[in-house]
Image (spheres, grey):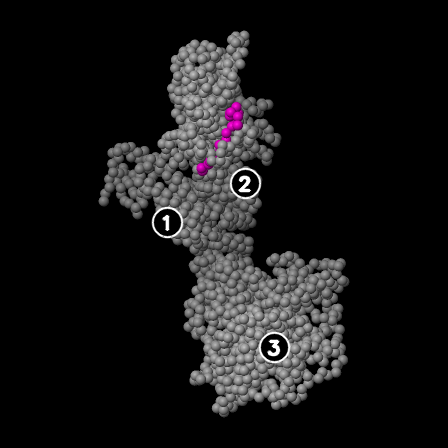
Amino acid sequence: MLCVCFMLANFRGMVQHGLPLEIGDTVQILEKCEGRYESMKTKNFETVIPTEDSVITEITMTLRDWGTMWKQLYMRNEGDLFHRLWHVMNEILELRQQVLVGHLTHDRLSDIKQHITARLDWGNEQLGLDLVPRRDFSMVDPDEISITELYRLMERRHRRREAPPQASMHHLFLQMKSMMSSNLGEELEVFYSVYDSREMRPISERFFVRLNKQGLPKSPEKTERQCTLFVDLGSSDLRKDVYVVAHIFRIGRMVAGEKKSVSNTQYKRPYGCAVISVADLLTADFKDDHVLKIYSCNAESEWYQIHDSIIRKVGSRYSHIGTNTGLNVSLQLLHGDMEQIRKDYMRLFTRNVSITKRLGFSDIIIPGEIRNDLYVTLERGEFEKGGKSVARNVEVTVYLLGGDGQVLKGLVCCGSGEPGVDEHRSFVLYHSNSPRWAEQIKLPIPLEMFHGTHLRFELRHCSSKTPLSKEKGEKKLFGFSFVPLMQDDGRPLPDGTHELIVHKCEETADLQDPARYLKLPFSKASLQPGNNQTIKNSKESFWIQSSLCSTKLTQNGDMLDLLKWRVHPDRIIDCLPKLKDIDGTEIVKFLQDTLDTLFGILDESPQRYGLKVFDCLVHVINLLQDSKFQLFKPVMDNYIENHFAGALSYRDLIRVLKWYVDRIIDAEHQEQIQQVLKASEYLFKYIVQSRRLYAAATGGQNEEEFRCSVHELFKSIHLFLSHESKGISPITHTQAVFLRSFPTVCCELLKIFSMREVANLARDTLSSLPALTHTDCPLQAVKLQCMAKTVDSPLYINPESRCVLLPVVLRLLHTHLQEQRELVLCANILTSMLTLNTPATECGVSEEVNLVMESLSGVLLRTILEVTNRPQPAATSLRLQYQDVTGEFVACLLTLLQQLKDKEYQQLLSRFPTKDELTSFLLQLFTVFRILIRPDMFPKDWTVMRLVANNVIITTILYLSDTLRNNFLNEKFDFKVWESYFYLCIIFINQPCLQLEMFPPSKRKKVLEKYGDMRVMIGCEIFSMWQHLGDYKLNLIPTLIGPFMEVTLVPQMDLRNVLIPIFHDMMDCEQQRSGNFKQVEAKLIDKLDGLMSEGKGDETYRELFNNILLKKIERETWRESGVSHIATVTRLMERLLDYRDCMKIGEVDGKTMGCTVNLLNFYKTELNKEEMYIRYIHKLYELHLKAQNYTEASYTLLLYDELLEWTERPLREFLTYPMQSEWQRKECLHLTIVHNFDRGKCWENCIILCRELANQYEAYYDYRNLSKMRMMEASFYDKIMNQQRLEPEFFRVGFYGKKFPFFLRNKEFVCRGNDYERLEAFQQRMLSEFPHAIAMQHANLPDQTIHQADAQYLQIYAVCPVPENQDVLQRDGVPNNIKSFYKVNHIWRFRYDRPFHKGTKDKENEFKSLWVERTTLTLAQSLPGISRWFEVEKRELVEMSPLENASEVIENKTLQLRTLIAQCQMRQMLNINPLTMCLNGVIDAAVNGGLARYQEAFFAKDYIANHPEDGEKITRLRELMFEQAHILEFGLAVHEKFVPQDMRPLHKKLVDQFHVMRSSLGIQFPAYVRVSPLHFANGSPRTCRTPVPNAISPEGGRIVARRSPLSYPAVNRYSSSSLSSQASNEVSNITGQSESSDEVFNMQPSPSTSSLSSNHSGSHNVNSSAPSSNRASPLPSDKHKHSRENACLSPRDRLCSGIFSSPLDPTQVRVLPPPLFNIGSLCKNVRSLSPMPTTRSPQKSIVPPLTPSPTDGLPMGSLASHSPARSGSYSSGISSLSRCSVSETCGIDLPPPDPPLPPTVPTDVPIRRGSKTPPPYSVYERNNPRRATPLPHSLSVPPSTDNPSLSSKPQLNRVQRINSEPRHRPTPRKVSQL
């Protein structure tokens, strides 16, 4: 398809890619490329134009990126930004549609593009996207402009966004909406104005709004009558004392509330006033509605100043008009010039808006503005009563009359918003002969009508009470005043106050002919002395104030005389000097006329008036330098270009100018000369234009004469510029004044001289300046400013003249950069110079670039280093300036380097004569590059600038690589250069702006297409340079290991493949040098922790690191050690990655703590990195504190405590610890640990630590702290006995599957649950920590399929702790509060029982085949410890036969009974229900048959015959059954004593059933004396210090001839036997009623009463879906309800209990003891079997009267816990209690032997009291309590050479004293590993 177009009009083609065409030319479209470009050809000319606007292209790309991020805003619940961005996107799409339609004017299209780009930039900023460099609304390609220009574009846009330009003009938009009032009945007139309370005058015209009787605008359809814009408010007007004032007048009767019949005339009367400060509107970004309070004046005579009274809060002069009255207005401040306001706020101007002007001219006078406004204010009057008894009500009517005496129509304006009227009637003040109105009107009189016009003021008295013959309410004329607007000399009425004469007049007809009164005097000031005395002495006067604002009329007589110089030529001499005294406003109003006058006088007589005209011209030119008149410079330029006609003026101007210049050096006063030189720019403009006019008129005559005069002038200039002054002199200031305007002078000379000629002139002028000037001389900065303007001028842009000026510029820059002065100006100059060097023009600027590099390269590098090392100033403006200087210098350096090619690099480097200079240059360059790469070098969103800079850096690095290889290898090797090179490359790769993985896909694609992945490029260069090092690698190995590791962690696969082999090279080099690579390994490990914690590295890197290095070392001789090293580093990576992943979640859970423990142990055991070990100890400690795991936190901190000794070794500041001695730090740690143990209720541990601290204080004689420590220790004993502690549950957790972290994968742990946490809650917590895990519903070990599955499986069930030391638990009389600690602390082993049936199940008796599978789990560390869970180290599986199971069940139930009976006897039970339930469950076994089932199963002859090996076990079972029967009997006796009356029937039922059960067992009890079963093996001195009455036994003190069946130790953990059954409904009801009825169980035991303590009964571990009861509840009666099915429940559905080891435990195989008692020999060898032997006295016994405390008498050593553990567990339904040996629990006391002599105790051995109570956790003896390895060097400081001992201490130091002084007490123990 061929497309041909024909031109219908000429087109010059002066725009970019423009095609010049003429009418009739043919244009052929050749092709269309991807819909974006078209190619045209005509007349052998071809071009390419875009088919789509660049703004449209940017919109398309940007909105695509926004769309994705916009959806993410919704997902992140950022609703505000989501909706705002949605509106902006819609707005951009609408504007895009307008641009695509193409029906827009050029100006409108530019406005829309500007609006679009503003919205795009706003959205990019809000979304954190990059700043887009633009020029003329289009994106800029960085490759098409220089880097300096790119920087300026970016900086300009960034600065505009950070600090938007401050507008100098402001405008106030006001919209009158309504007046709210409840009693309106009259129309209102409201006048708004802007009032300056400081100067007490209005600064704007008035805005006039009429309101109807409802308080609404009368003409709502005419918006200009209710909306206005107060324009031209200056910045000084936006302050607190500038107000918007509203005066309100009512139109109605004279007196409010007056009867209608009194008068029908309408009067304008004062109503109220409202004010609001303009400063209150500054914070409003949009149009706000305001309700202004209205105040009335208390006295009408004060009305003229009511607004001022309100502002000053003079409350006595005004009062508030009702609470429901107010003005409802909208106010909004707008900023900028009017043209910009109309564009930005188009919605305000869619309808008409009235403009309310400023009184007088604005701060900036705009040329071309035409104003001729006369403002008249009716000030006040003084009138006589005129024969009236009361004062008059005066109304003033104002008329404007022309020269013909006719009233001028529509030229009287009361205010904007209403059209002009013919007359104005003032408001009326009631009964006032001295009224004050202060009412302003405007008279916009045309210039041609101004002459002959006058104002007439008619004065009338208004009264509603007139004679009956006249109409009511007549307004009677009683006088008038007038004033002409033009004086006789042609000047208008002067500004100011005028006292007018009041002429008597009572008839309006007398005023019909103005000529009759115009001859009369109008003002008392105009009266001649002695004339018209009658008028002068009149008491009546009328005052007005006038102000003229005119661009055509002047009130200045001197100005008129000058402009009319031809009429009075004799006055020229006097008029010219007076021009300097005329107000500048008057001069600029008549600027062209003034200039014509001056040059006319100059042409008239140059010799006579030349100097004076020159001075006047200088004054006028300098007047335009004022900011108020600066907009008139274009007016003067236009005058010079189009209206100036002085063809001969150049001669006189050059002559006078040279005369002034020649006098500079000798002149005493420089002020006038400086004014002349300040105006030199426009003087030369006049000179040049005059010469051009003369040359055009004469054909170029006198050209040589003109050139000579100009050169002579510049010789004089060079002479005064070369003058050197000492210090700062007036001549120095004069030199500076000329230099400021010199660049513009050169630009003017280019109009008549050639480029080369002007360049030489500029060079000579700049070179004439003195080289050496004072440091503080202002000439230095002015020289640079002059140079900056010169570089920006066309003179430097031209290549021909640039080669002339460049050496001068470089010399000046070098001097200032060398001295570090005026850096801002130097940066601007250098940036402007290099902005010309674009990539497109680089072929022509190579010589210039070489010249700049040769002159400035070194000093530029030093300047950048100096500037970047300075601290940034605090002030915002200075900080921005600092950033600009740094950025500009950097951009200049990058531009220079960008222009260099290989040849230029060689030339640059060859200029350094010595290697040291080359080394210095390279080091400086590398350092600057590192500075450029810093994130704070450029703002965050300057990605374009960063990528361009990186592209230059990488190019330079590649060029310099050859230089390093050629000049710094072999014998010339330089470590600093190579180290700096590698560090630069490493920092380059790691910079954030090159991490493409973090970019959005579209942005990443653009970067890769334009620059590629620069990280891979530089990585390949690193590897290449490393290979070239050869043997010199050894010099860099220790230094670069860490940086190389950091580089390889960058997630770029190609980069990792390239650089990871370098580690193999390092290992090989180190192996060859030292025979190992320990140094490489240590550096890698040290660096890994920090890098991984920063988020670097991933699982892919770990695998890649392992695979690449293993492959590399396959053939190495040191392969074995290499594999070990790689494995160590890989394992560390695994743990660090796990730790980082856990910490990312931000939640403190078991996974996070377990990961920390795993990493901590790795650093200690495998790496022996003590400092890292200690750091992670404290990280774990903080995690525990955050989770409120105070016990675990204490154990964790104890790890650090045990590394320290009680020595005076100084320790440096570390973590949060100050510099202190080792003793002080250990003391601090002890106290912290004690505090946390206290919070965790582990008071037994607190006691041990307190004792250790107390020993130290005692050794130091620090008795004050010793006393505190002993009191603290005593408080812990009180807490043990008085406070209740919850016993935690323990859970076994298995983590299976490959999706778990390494430290959990396919491992099983035992976890210590939280307080009150049961199985269900624990399961939910674990599933929440691992939301993707699948909970396994069985307790069987999973197979390999589960282990290798790509998923997460959790297996959780409850386990029972097996206490390690049972001495305390087996001892009778130890309170439960003490025992409870040892049952759940220092636990290594846990047990889980699973019942199953082996063989055929007997349906009649299931116990025959009921086996138990007992699993014992041994942990790596004991619980509690530094973590809430520890890994299972060993698993043991044992099967228990049905017979063994039966024996264990009965034994456990017996022990449970004994405990409950003891608690009941000792009054430790608040309720007897638990004992009742337990007795009922055993005796009334209605569900499963009770003991009869066991008799049937195991006592049958068939079973005994078939299992002869179980003879002893059967005997044991029988003995246990008999023992249980005796316990039941005693229990019933105790129950009978304490049972309440309402439960007596139940007790009787139990007694009857017991006799039936005993008969079924065939038990025949011999006659014996019953005693209490509470018999202690050794007697409990703790609880039996005094005899206890026999009332403790139900039947008194009866002697028993056998061992008490309750002499077995009570235990804490047990469960209901399978023999038990649920209580009947009757029992349940009675139990419920008796809980609060029996007062016996509310009694407190006596302090002297023995109490057998035991924990509450019932299981606390529930492994089923049903919730379990609270272990800490004092009423655990509901915990003993079991059914037959309980014995067969799955492990998840049964109650679990049992703590002691099984007799069949293979680890504890022991010979079963003989039967506990023989019924036939119970009465033999009986001594006194009373449980409370009264014959034993504490004073006579060798046993101490008090049992030692749980921690007394411990052996020396730390609190370690690594002793062999004894197994034990509890199961669901089937419980097991290990039996105690007879030797430990024998209830028969032998006669005590004679007391032996006390043994001799050596003085150096501490005296210990015997105790079987174990410590809270294991302690052990250590010969060497300290490790041989000292603290790491990083944690200690070298001891001082002279360390005098403290004066307060004894002569021996603490350690010596402890070792030398014998003490009869335990020595301090050391807390060991936990």
Q: Earlier in the sequence, mark 3 or mark 1?
A: 1
Q: Residue at x 61, y 65 (%)?
A: 1237
Whole-angstrom CA distance, mark 2 to mark 1, is: 39 Å
Residue 1810 place in picture, x, y as percent: 69, 76
Q: Earlier in the sequence, mark 2 or mark 3?
A: 2
Please, what is the three-letter code of the amino acid marked with disc 1? Answer: Arg
Quadrant position of residue 1550: bottom right
Decide whether residue 1036 is among the magenta residues: no
Secondary structure at numbered mark 2: helix
Quadrant position of residue 637: top left
Give the magenta-colored segment's residue range: 288-306
Secondary structure at numbered mark 3: helix
Which mark is on residue 1537? 3
Which mark is on residue 878? 2
Pointer 3: residues within 10 angstroms few (<14), some, or many (20+)? few
Q: Nearer the viewer, residue 716 or 1557?
A: 1557
